[in-house]
Amino acid sequence: MITQLEAPAEPDPFDHPDLRDPQRARQAERNARKGARKGRREAKKVRKQQVENWGRQPKKRFRRTRAIALVVVVLAVAGGGIYLIQQARDDQPVGTYADRPAADPIDLNRPFADTPAHDWAEGADAIVVPKAVAVGGFTAERVARAYDEVKAMLVASRLDPRMIEHGEVEPFLALLAEGQREEIRGQFREAEWPAPYATRIAPGFRLLAAPPRINGTMIAEPGPAPGSLRVRTNYVFAYAFDVDDPREVPAPLDLVAVFRADVSYLLYEGERWVPRDRGYFLDRAESFTYSMSCEAMRKGLLAPAYSDRTALGLPDSRRPPEYFDHTKPIPDVNTCGAPEAG
């Protein structure tokens, strides 16, 4: 019978008498802390030497990772904000932000594209007369002719290049009754151009080939006396100005100036009136200008907003579509802070 002898047990290294001695344990802890402090001092010396050799302190890898993560988060938040802003803009009518810088340069071939006038008709064809009906003592046929005659006065005063570019007033005055021509002619000779009656571009500026865009209405009603007919007109005219370098005009409305004119014309007709008073008289006239040079406006003239050196006031809470809307009441104060002409 063979008997297997067991090997003697090896001593446990973690059961050394020195480890059970509290005094020795405290001394070992103090030595470990002292060694850690010495290691940190040596590490600082190494980094200092690196700064002297390389000119900057090397970044720790975990800090770089944290910075990259932070940038990613910031970009994500910013991107989300831009997306939300863009979504909010997409839900607004075209032209809501036409007074703010656009992402791309303005296309001079399509100056109205990003304005509230983007889908308006252009030129004289935009002035569409309503269906005529008999009014007071005037037949429907005579009212229809009155609409066409008033349209001709609107074209002569707001669209004819002779008037708006050169200030030639006689073609327009010829459409008025003889009894009022000299009075109105005198107003055109004043230092301030009578903008409620006709539009004039400030010298030194030129319009683009794109015809003005127009929106509005006219309506006939009985005049103040027998044999008279009043035709009320309510139109907004948008004029696009030329510029040498489109990059100088960041916002669409820097090039497009808007003129609102509410003018009524009185027609006197028949034997009741002396010959020189038969015809059309300018009655009440109110006007409003928006997105234009305030400096030119104070002279009664029209010029683009980009040319203005006048300091702007507080931001306007109203958006461009409201100013382009001919159904809204004319504001008491224009965007230059001055009372409106009436």
Image (spheres, rainbow, N blue to C red):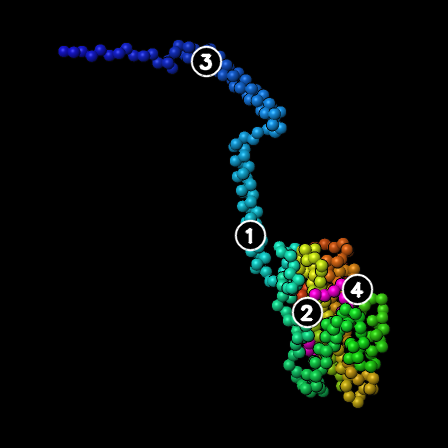
Q: Measured from the top left, where is residue 229 in percent x and y?
A: 74, 82
Q: Which residue is mark 1?
A: 83
Residue 29 position (above or below residue 293): above
Q: CA separation, marks 1 and 2? A: 36 Å
- For marks 1 and 3, give the one nearer the viewer: 1
Q: CA separation, marks 1 and 3? A: 63 Å
Q: Which residue is mark 3?
A: 25
Which SS class for mark 1? helix
Residue found farthest to the front? 244
- For marks 1 and 4, give the one nearer the viewer: 4
Report the amino acid beneath label 3. Ala
Q: How packed is label 2: few (under 14 Cα within 10 Å), some, or many (20 or more)?
A: some
Report the amino acid beneath label 2. Pro
Quarter placement of the N terminus: top left
Q: Which residue is mark 4?
A: 203
First in sequence, mark 4 or 2: give its number: 4
- For marks 3 and 2, give the one nearer the viewer: 2
Query: Which residue is depicted at the point 53% across and 19% down?
Result: 39
Report the amino acid beneath label 4. Pro
Q: How packed is label 4: few (under 14 Cα within 10 Å), some, or many (20 or more)?
A: few
Report the amino acid beneath label 1. Tyr
Q: Measured from the top left, where is residue 293 in percent x and y?
A: 75, 60
- For marks 1 and 2, give the one nearer the viewer: 2
Asked if residue 63 lies left or right of residue 122, the reply is left
- Closest to the observer, 239 or 269: 239
- Closest to the observer, 50 or 28: 50
First in sequence, mark 1 or 4: give its number: 1
| Span of residues in magenta | 199-221
Q: How packed is label 1: few (under 14 Cα within 10 Å), some, or many (20 or more)?
A: few
